[in-house]
Image (spheres, grey):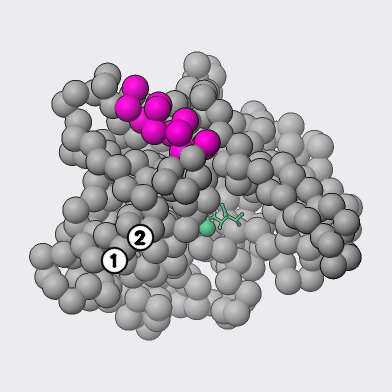
Amino acid sequence: MRRKPHLRKHIAVLPCDGAGKEVVPEAIKVLRAAGADLEFQEYDVNADQYMRSGQPIPPDVWNDLQKADAILFGAVGDPRIDDSTYLAGVLLRLRFELDLYVNLRPAKLYDDRLSPLRREERRMVDMLIVRENTEGLYVGMGGRFKKGTEQEVAIQEDLNTYLGVTRIIEYAFGAAKGEVVMVDKSNAMTHAGGLWQQQWKAVAKKHPNIKTRHLYVDAAAMQLVRDPSQFDVIVTGNLFGDILSDLTAELIGGMGIAPSANINPKTGRGLFEPVHGTAPDIAGRGVVNPVGAILSASMMVKHLGYTEMANAIEGAVESAIRAGECTRDIGGDLSTSQAGDAVAKRLKD
Ligand code: IPM
Ligand code: MN
């Protein structure tokens, strides 16, 4: 059940590291321009803090994050530290412990010039990847035996539960207008694949009006490149969803503009982050594209119930991109903050 709404929604802001620190302020700028009545509280969760305290998320911050109406997130990672422990302690902890089991990754092409597709009719890209976000190969089960020797054995378990598989497939049917495509690798990974196949068929039966199709992940990657306009909703496991959503990001203009939402539709909790990471190669120079973060903020306000505002933000992004008022990676010549201004000013008019 959704928690009792406060008068004013509290948004916990975690810009984190690198590019995240640059794009999150732009998302907040746009939310303010759109008139969002939100209270933002920023937290010191980042590599510097972790190196000082040894805690990816300090306990008092964790308490606050659990109470927030939503979390606006940048990106985590730092070349100076062991990525996996830090990642597990921040992003994966939030996804797992807040049980944000749905990871929504929409891919919509806002302007033809951003498309790598030769054929015009294949550029109607407007799809949603529904990625399972709390299980699969991400759970960190397994271990390394005889570590450091030439006999070393490393095992990474792929965890799939009846509950986890069923609820994500159910969510996908709820989100689809046309068709749901389920993607797995059940020809080779028969145990996990068997459970996905079984629940896919069971849930599909309850939605006779929605078309269904199944693709193995290799074929799905091929079809996504060949003609992405064929897709509406794709539902898949954690790792395949991660991989395919980088592919779909590239189809719409690159990692800089792809948004994502990590949500639990039952509790109402949510964390909203661009698909891109900290981009250490370009971070800190004012050239990072803020659109992924801005569109993630739009997904956040939609999740909080402000559908019109979400649509207005998306429309402003589309208009700025079409006018070429954007960063270099998508053909403009604006800085991060100017690109944020270009979206914000369209909302103020
Ligand atoms: C993403 C990222 C993360 C993931 C990493 C940073 C663990 O690539 O959100 O897509 O794989 O989920
Ligand atoms: Mn990823």
Residue in front for this viewpoint, 198 or 262: 198
Amino acid type, residue under disc 2 in the picture: Ala
- The answer to whether residue 241 is above or below residue 117 is above
Q: What crowding class fits label 1: few (fewer than 14 Cα within 10 Å), some (14-19), or many (20 or more)?
A: some
Query: Judging from the image, what secondary structure is the residue with disc 2 in?
Result: helix
* Magenta residues, dominant SS class: helix
Residue 59 placement, left or right of 159 = right
Alpha carbon of mark 1 to alpha carbon of mark 2: how far?
Answer: 6 Å
The span shown in magenta is 191-202
Residue 62 placement, left or right of 71 = right
Q: Position of residue 194 (x, y in %)?
A: 45, 33
- The stretch drawn in magenta includes residue 198: yes
Do the residues bearing badges 1 and 2 touch, measured as CB atoms within 8 Å? yes
Label 1 sits on residue? 225
Label 2 sits on residue? 221
- The answer to whether residue 135 is above or below residue 330 is above
Q: Position of residue 131 (x, y in %)?
A: 45, 43
